[in-house]
DNA sequence: CGATTCTAGTCAGGGCCCTTGCCTAGAAAG
DNA sequence: CTTTCTAGGCAAGGGCCCTGACTAGAATCG
């Protein structure tokens, strides 16, 4: 008599979501296992599996319960269908491009690495990006549903392009990763209906590295001190990117320079002669081998930046990362002790340059891939 | 055969929530009006009203549909029960204490104003607060379910107490508003089960004033320049308070002082002799009558603070409020034009000192009161 | 003034989703 | 070969919502 009952769909969608999430966690389950795992009845579990199989999200693996479990009838294992596809996780840094394909379980299916020249030539970077991503997707043999990109330069939140802020280090150069990767990405048609279903997400690498920090409480800040200067601010459990995505671009933050003058953060390195000639990057090697006096000047400048972060964002603690940040943590800590508001400081847990970024990128890619699967089923 | 079916409760709870929200918006509706308004069938609307009436959340007003509507049977108007209670909205500022009781429709039921001495004496402030709140609740004749407080000093997020930051203006003084107001607040018993159901919420007044700004897009910052210096940072649509609730306490933010030296923001006023003798407050009158040179120094310091906010939070625009901020907006704007990253600046829409704060406090109080009603029904 | 008109509210029947209880299938253990 | 034990399916029933028909009751019209 009736056929449109949106309110009832709600509970069915909830059941299906539980089934999908259980399969993401356990990889393969029989219908009976699903029922006990989720806390629903076996007929309901069976119905849900039937619906999801019909929709192509779940498939019978062909495996049967091992006899080792004891006597009793054999059960059929179900798992998420391979057609669900993979997510592309990409980092773009001066050291090169890394592209990985992740499946819905978070496993790396394929990985491509492409070096790039220094200084970076935009055309070559674009080529390496396209090449690495295409190879990873091709080789995985599965459709890429979305891409998450971490880049070592400021990213415009609206367009996803890398942008050159005046006088700040600009390492990778003009690039539009979204445009390059879009042809490789084939989202499930249904996902496109969703408002927020972006196919390619680009963000600054520091923000992703912060995401990969362990513990990750509600409020902290990640200060990146390397060839560039960056800062990720995590507030109420989320990385805050700001209106254009340029939150934490601290190159021009006023801080204490030589002789106590107020100058932009990046200028301090100019005045100390620690920028690479002909580029906008900080010379990491020379910072690491600098003398005590220069180190103290740098530490005072860093402490000034920390004071600004504390005043404006009130983090629970500061994490110091980047190529030279952790090496100077003692001086930095000493300088920060003088600040009116004290804040615990520690070095970043991961010290490499690409791996922590990639870890954060992968975490987000996985989260989004999984969400896309769950959303897909509720929107049919 | 069965009695526990949590999944089905979900859809019933959804229906009840829709009914409650519709009544919050329209104040009184017949069951038939509820059905068409929400888009459910009349029997369902009738059932929901019966449940909610039984639970004491909804009551028959006794009114009947006016004959003027035309022929047809008269309908019974239902409305939210008065026992739902009121929310207490309070501001504590050097000018005095204001306490208002709001009903679930956002109307002010009672309002009490108590002046306090300058400088504030903690015991008197506590007395005025207790007195104003008690009078407002008493007179309203209805139980207060929660309280939201705006105070003109830094607020510790965990304890809700006003805290004295070293050397920063401290206008109201030691105070624990939560302890004072808790005896007046009687939350619905059920609400207490909810994890986040705080009875008394305290926050810095600047944060609330930002909440009351019109338009209120996703990312902006509100710079408060008055007796104290404060800043509210709205990121992704929410006021970000930081780990201790001290985000935006910018008195010690390093900025440009006289002769281009890097000094804390509040020190600039010291060096210009613009702090009230014997207190930690800025002398607003003398700032307003200051000469061009001092104004330029102040503007440069403000621009330094703005640069820090832009670098760290990347707001879409800056709003300047407080007793003297809008008066100096031209010089501030001129100084900010020199910054490497440009940001639109405008004066706050509301210029008074307590009214914009109270508006934000009331908005939050209303939001929480309404939520508490909706949650109450779903937790039975 | 009575018949008509029109709307609020209720009742009966039915569909969907879930649950419990019972049955069948089918392999291992004895 | 019989027993044992588990996966899966079927049937019945309850809760929620919906549609459609019915009742209640006041205003309007002839």
Image: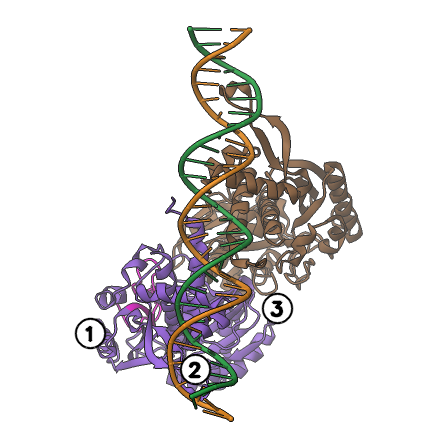
Chain colours: A purple, B brown, C orange, D green
Image-quadrant location for residue A112 = bottom left
Residue A341, disc: 3
| Residue nearest the viewer, comparing A178 with B142 | B142
Q: Residue B355: x, y in percent? A: 60, 41
Position in image of residue B143 (x %, y %): 72, 43
Apparent side of residue A25 relative to residue B230 in the rendered image (left or right): left
Q: Main secondary structure of the magenta part?
A: loop
Co-location on one chain, circles 3 and 2 = yes
Tell me the quarter of the image containing the N terminus of chain B.
Answer: bottom right
Q: Nearer the viewer, residue B175 or A341?
A: B175
Element on which disc 2 rests? loop
Q: Is residue A13 above or below residue B143?
A: below
Quick check: can you spot residue B371?
yes
> Residue A324 has which mark?
2
Q: Which residues are magenta?
A: A145-174
Q: Disc 3 and disc 1: Cα gap in Å?
A: 47 Å
Q: Residue at x 54, y 67 (%)?
A: A219
Give neighbour class at mark 1: few <14, some 14-19, many 20+ (Cα, 10 Å): some
- The disc placed on residue A127 is 1
Left or right relative to B273: residue B219: left
Q: Position of residue B278 (x, y in %)?
A: 72, 55
A185 versus B128 height, above or below:
below
Characterize the local packing of mark 2: few (<14), some (14-19) or many (20 or more) Cα atoms within 10 angstroms: some
Q: Chain of mark 1?
A: A
**Residue A209 seen by the camera:** no
Closer to the N terminus: mark 2 or mark 1? 1
Of callouts 3 and 2, the N-terminal one: 2
Q: Residue at x 42, y 59 (%)?
A: A13
What secondary structure is found at the residue carrying circle 3?
loop
User: Which chain contains the residue that carries disc 3?
Assistant: A
Residue D3 rendering spot, x and y as whole percentages: 51, 85
Magenta stretch holds residue A159: yes
């Amino acid at each position: 008599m009736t056929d449109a009952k949106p309110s009832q769909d709600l509970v069915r969608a909830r059941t299906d979501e539980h089934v999908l999430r259980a399969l993401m966690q356990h990889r393969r389950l029989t219908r009976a296992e699903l029922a006990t795992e989720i806390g629903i009845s076996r007929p309901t579990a069976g119905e849900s599996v039937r619906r999801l199989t019909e929709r192509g999200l779940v498939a019978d693996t062909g495996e049967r319960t091992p006899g080792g479990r004891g006597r009793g009838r054999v059960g059929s294992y179900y798992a998420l269908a391979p057609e669900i596809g993979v997510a592309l996780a990409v980092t773009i840094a001066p050291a090169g491009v890394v592209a990985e394909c992740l499946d819905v379980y978070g496993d790396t299916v394929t990985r491509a690495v492409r070096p790039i020249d220094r200084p970076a030539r935009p055309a070559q970077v674009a080529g390496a990006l396209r090449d690495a991503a295409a190879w990873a997707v091709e080789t995985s043999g599965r459709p890429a549903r979305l891409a998450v990109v971490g880049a070592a330069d400021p990213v415009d939140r609206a367009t996803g392009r890398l942008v050159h802020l005046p006088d700040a280090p600009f390492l990778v150069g003009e690039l539009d990763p979204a445009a390059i990767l879009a042809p490789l990405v084939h989202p499930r048609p249904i996902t496109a209906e969703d408002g927020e279903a972006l196919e390619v997400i680009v963000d600054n690498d520091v923000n992703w590295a912060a995401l990969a920090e362990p513990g990750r409480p509600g409020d902290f800040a990640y200060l990146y001190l390397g060839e560039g200067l960056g800062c990720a601010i995590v507030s109420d459990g989320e990385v805050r990117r700001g209106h254009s995505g340029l939150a934490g671009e601290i190159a021009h933050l006023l801080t204490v320079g030589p002789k106590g003058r107020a100058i932009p953060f990046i200028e301090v390195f100019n005045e100390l002669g620690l920028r690479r000639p002909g580029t906008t990057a900080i010379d990491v090697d020379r910072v690491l081998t600098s003398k005590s006096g220069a180190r103290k000047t740098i530490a005072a400048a860093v402490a000034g930046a920390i004071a600004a972060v504390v005043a404006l964002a009130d983090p629970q603690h500061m994490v110091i990362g980047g190529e030279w940040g952790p090496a100077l943590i003692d001086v930095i800590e000493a300088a920060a002790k003088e600040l009116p508001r004290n804040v615990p400081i520690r070095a970043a847990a991961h010290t490499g340059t690409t791996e922590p970024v990639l870890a954060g990128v992968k975490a987000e890619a996985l989260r989004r891939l999984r969400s896309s699967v769950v959303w897909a089923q509720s929107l049919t």
